[in-house]
């Protein structure tokens, strides 16, 4: 048994690491010279440390264990205490979003009508299971429209680059309809199921999150960077052969009993099309909206807002330009020069696609104008930069259903999918899923 892994982002690297720990033979191919995919930390000559991708991580048990195994626990840096506060734009100004169900009732953020809707949720009966129900419909049905407009909508835009009117609840948050069915009330189920569970730590690594993927790649014995898989073929005995283009030119890698696709769907689809056309078509249809990150630094004295939080999200109902901003300098003060603040502002996603396609100068100017308006900024930026993803986060809308079904079917042909479109979009999701797949593949080897 030998596994061919295609893609060296966090999913592919984690899968390879756990296969290696279990003694399962593998080869990992990554087209780029740099490992890590979307985990990309970029120091700048101006003294900023930027995250071009995830800005921080929730420290799940699986991620904690991986960092321990790699000897990286001494590099963990917790987010500053103020980051527990999250702001949301409402009526033209940023207000603190309540962080727990009890706070929803006591905080002045929501109207009395919205609070009454929350209380009524405890007595509202469970609705029928509906595989096509969207996130917005689920929350509107259980909690009312104001919660959707000012909590769900900005959260989905800021974290998932998504539109809650299109994302499916059973794909995005499957635990919520499960709580509704089990307890009748989502809030009651949440309270009972989360007893004793504290809030997970929000962390980074001292030199940026890319340290994680760089370390993983350095520890792997069969990792081949700058090596693109250009075609997949299958022998009569059922094993797979990969056509490669690497530093030495074209070559072939034969004899893989299993393949692991640690690729976005749009990269996996062309490889699958000759052997599995229906699966390729399903994967090609998955939507990845464009997204840009605009980094803006100011003198602290020029910004009126206290910036005492993780950042701020902008609901669509407020007609903003950007989906929101992370207050990078508040979360990790050592990432910026002394006396400055740094905003990481997200432009684009499923609800703001037109803005994501604007020219760089127009985006920077629009972001500065919006930041100045909402944060009381009185000077021009000391520094700005931009990074764009033409295709950012896979959307768990109706198109992902066929892609997941295709992944299930491919598993019968010894092809497993371990990318974020299958595992979940968060890094902890990818680590958890890749580890589980490594365990499953290891058990199959023992069966053989």
Image (cartoon, helix red, strand yellow):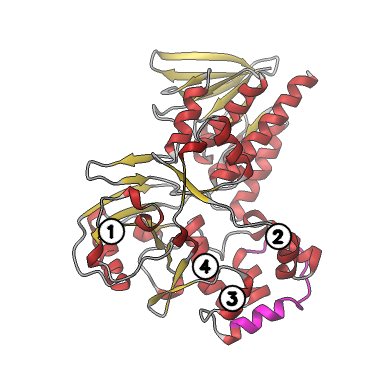
| Mark nearer the viewer, 1 or 2 | 2
Disc 4 is placed on an element classified as: helix
Q: CA distance from mark 3 to mark 4?
A: 16 Å
Residue 28 sits inside the magenta stretch: no
Q: Classify residue 281 as left or right of residue 119.
A: left
Q: Which residue is mark 4?
A: 153
Q: Which residue is mark 3?
A: 104
Task: Tell me what residue is drawn at x 57 percent, y 26 percent.
Answer: 5
Residue 163, x across and y down, in percent: 52, 62
Part of the protein shown in magenta: 114-134
Q: Earlier in the sequence, mark 3 or mark 4?
A: 3
| Mark nearer the viewer, 3 or 1 | 3
Disc 3 is placed on an element classified as: helix
Residue 319, x across and y down, in percent: 39, 73
Q: Residue furthest bottom?
A: 112
Q: Which residue is mark 2?
A: 194
* Of residues 445 and 44, the one drawn nearer to the viewer in this rendering: 44
Q: Earlier in the sequence, mark 2 or mark 3?
A: 3
Residue 336, x across and y down, in percent: 29, 50
Q: CA distance from mark 1 to mark 2?
A: 41 Å
The reply to whether residue 421 is visible in this rendering is no
Q: Classify residue 245 as left or right of residue 410.
A: left
Q: CA distance from mark 2 to mark 3?
A: 17 Å
Q: CA distance from mark 4 to mark 2?
A: 24 Å
Q: Which residue is mark 1?
A: 363
Q: Residues within 10 Å of mark 3 (few under 14, many from 20)?
A: some
Q: Earlier in the sequence, mark 1 or mark 4?
A: 4
* Of residues 362 and 306, the one drawn nearer to the viewer in this rendering: 306
The reply to whether residue 167 is visible in this rendering is yes
């Amino acid at each position: 048994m030998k596994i061919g892994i295609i893609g060296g982002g966090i999913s592919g690297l984690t899968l390879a690491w756990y296969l290696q720990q279990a003694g399962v033979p593998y080869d990992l191919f990554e087209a780029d010279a740099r490992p890590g995919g979307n985990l990309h930390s970029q120091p700048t000559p101006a003294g900023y440390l930027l995250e071009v991708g995830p800005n921080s991580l929730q420290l799940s048990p699986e991620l904690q264990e991986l960092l321990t195994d790699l000897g990286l626990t001494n590099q963990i840096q917790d987010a500053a205490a103020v980051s527990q506060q999250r702001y949301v734009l409402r009526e033209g100004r940023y207000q603190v979003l309540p962080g727990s169900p009890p706070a929803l009732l006591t905080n002045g953020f929501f109207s009395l009508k919205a609070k009454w809707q929350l209380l009524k949720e405890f007595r509202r009966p469970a609705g029928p299971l509906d595989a096509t129900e969207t996130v917005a419909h689920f929350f509107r049905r259980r909690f009312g429209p104001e919660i959707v407009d000012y909590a769900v909508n900005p959260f989905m835009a800021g974290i998932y680059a998504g539109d809650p009117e299109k994302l499916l609840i059973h794909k995005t948050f499957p635990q919520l309809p499960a709580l509704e069915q089990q307890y009748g009330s989502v809030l009651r189920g949440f309270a009972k199921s989360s007893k004793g569970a504290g809030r997970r730590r929000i962390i980074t690594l001292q030199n940026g999150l890319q340290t994680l993927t760089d370390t993983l790649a350095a520890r792997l014995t069969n990792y081949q960077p700058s090596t693109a898989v250009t075609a997949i073929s299958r022998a009569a005995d059922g094993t797979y052969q990969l056509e490669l283009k690497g530093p030495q030119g074209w070559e072939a890698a034969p004899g893989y009993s299993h393949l692991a696709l640690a690729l976005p769907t749009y990269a996996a689809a062309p490889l699958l099309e000759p052997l599995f056309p229906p699966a390729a078509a399903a994967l090609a249809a998955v939507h990845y909206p464009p997204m840009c990150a605009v980094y803006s630094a100011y003198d602290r004295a020029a910004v009126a807002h206290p910036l005492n939080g993780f950042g701020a999200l902008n609901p669509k109902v407020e007609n903003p330009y950007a989906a929101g901003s992370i207050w990078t300098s508040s979360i990790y003060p050592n990432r910026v020069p002394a006396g400055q603040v740094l905003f990481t502002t997200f432009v684009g996603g499923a609800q703001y696609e037109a803005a994501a396609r604007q020219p760089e100068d127009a985006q920077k100017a629009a972001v500065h104008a919006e930041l100045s308006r909402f944060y009381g900024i009185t000077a021009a930026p000391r520094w700005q930069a931009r990074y764009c993803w033409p295709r950012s986060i896979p959307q768990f809308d109706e198109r992902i259903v066929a892609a997941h079904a295709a992944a299930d079917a491919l598993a019968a042909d010894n092809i497993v999918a371990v990318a974020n479109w299958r595992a979940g979009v968060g890094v902890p999701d990818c680590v958890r899923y890749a580890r589980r797949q490594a365990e499953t593949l290891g058990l199959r080897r023992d069966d053989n």
